[in-house]
Amino acid sequence: MQYISTRGTAPVLDFEATMLTGLARDGGLYLPDHVPPMKMSEIASLAGLSYEEQAYLVMRPFIGSAFTDEEFREIIARAYAGFGHPARAPMKQLAPNHFLLELFHGPTLAFKDFAMQLIGQLFQAALKRSGDRVTIVGATSGDTGSAAIEAFRGLENVDVFILYPHGRVSEVQRRQMTTPTESNVHAIAVDGDFDTCQALVKDMFNDFEFRDEVGLAGVNSINWARVLAQVVYYFSAAVTLGAPHRPVSFTVPTGNFGDIFAGYIARSMGLPIEKLVVATNQNDILHRALATGGYVTDGVKPSISPSMDIQVSSNFERALFDAYGRDGAAVAQLMDELKSGGGFQISQGALQYLRETFASGRASEEETAATITRTVGATAEVLCPHSAVGVHVAEANLSATPMVTLATAHPAKFPDAVEAATGTRPALPERMADLFERPERVTRLPNDLSAIESHIRENRTV
């Protein structure tokens, strides 16, 4: 299995190099040169297996010779040992043919744990073998950062620096990033929004002198291993509902497009997914792009679902790569137009491909809050605002095919929004009950590449 860049000129890499590299040196994102199919019998055989065994069987073809079978099984076992539910990703029924996939039972109460816990163990195994040390830099709208810090805290051979937008994450999200005491993890509050943080990270990767000096690696969803780990729960949910013998649809609340792109990979492998529905909040650039063909940034509007407050959805580039027939030069041109002019127009052929692949919808602030209120009254299920965006959009796309909405975070991560909608403040799990009493450790920096690079140089372990 080889991996190629969406912009066509970076070196072709194997899985381990792709994982450790993160962003390709031509600025693109890595993808497998082909998607290995699963036979119907292989998909059917997943039913009844543990989540860990399903994960091994789904991901193994993508790994190549990077890890032995035994190593990979042990890595997966360590990754999910700290989850708070034995099913790892349990489902609940909300209504006839509508199911909620709970992805918030990991250490930081968000779906990002499925990928980040795995990638932490993959990095540790690879670096221990090579003796190398890397500096991980990531940008977060809230959940990726806390999941990354939790996954890498205290691990050898790794320093972690997470950039988050100052004042634009929930207090729980912030404290999950700023209260760990391990010296190898660092939280940086940046003046700006998530797109500011994401652009700074990409600029660091494109500063090759700095990149090589500190051994830069990335764990945002630009990293293929992150997307691969998320593919598994599509299979897990679908076989529970009868796949491959009947199709299943998914609605995914998403800002950066990585989670729903994992569903696209699952479908490309042969999982019978009828609909993949993109659910956006008021920062609806993905919905607008699919509706009009114009991918045009419009400024980030802070919302009650802050992890989706994004205008530059980095993983959309991967979908565009396939929509443009894997033409790296065409994708590179679109990304140049986005950087220089704030947007681009999707060609008619590519737009048709995307519309045949993805449906979409949006939820306003009022619709999101109303969905939280209505759902808890009807089912006693308390939704976080991101999950509520998904449920609202899913309800407009229900059919005879079972619909699974991804519940991406625990409601206690966003207590103010949930309390406003339900009158009850959701409590953190007991293992996190003292979160608000722990001392914080954070550095606030301006939107200045040189200042952030200097901070990383001075604080990484040499």
Image (cartoon, rainbow, N blue to C red):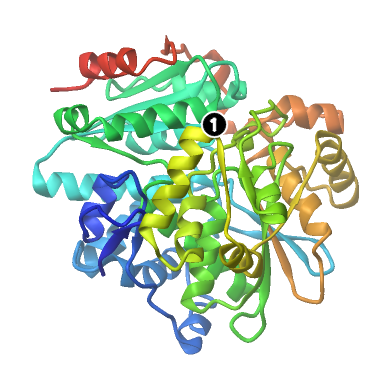
The local crowd at label 1, few if under 14, some if 14 to 19, many if 20 or more residues have their Cα within 10 Å, is many
Please determine whether, in this image, residue 168 is positioned above or below residue 20. above
In this orientation, does residue 81 appear?
no
Left or right: residue 143 compared with residue 460: right
Task: Residue lying at the far bottom in this picture: please name it.
Answer: 41
Q: Is residue 383 above or below residue 406?
A: above
Q: Is residue 124 left or right of residue 361?
A: left
* Observer able to see residue 227: yes
Residue situated furthest left in the rendering:
131
Three-letter amino acid code at disc 1?
Answer: Ser
For mark 1, give the secondary structure: loop
Task: Specify the quadrant that holds the N terminus.
Answer: bottom left
Q: Which residue is mark 1?
A: 141
Query: Quadrant where the C terminus lies?
Result: top left
User: Where does the image place residue 111, in percent across and percent down from the top left?
Assistant: 54, 47
Q: Observer-nearest residue: 39 or 86?
A: 39
Task: Please report the residue visible at 46 percent of the width from the left and 16 percent of the height from the top.
Answer: 189
Instruction: Say whether residue 311 is left or right of residue 132.
Output: right
Point out residue 77 in the picture as x, y percentages from the top left corner: 36, 57
Report which quarter residue 116 is drawn in: top left
Residue occupying the point 83% across, 36% down = 369
Residue 87 in the image, given as x and y percentages of width and height? 55, 60
Quadrant of res 377:
top right
Q: How many marks?
A: 1
Residue at the spot 32% in from the left edge and 12% down from the top edge:
451
Between 392 and 101, the one lying in front of the other is: 392
Q: Position of residue 379 (x, y in %)?
A: 85, 52
Left or right for 144, reference 409: left
Which sits in the foreground, 371 or 15?
15
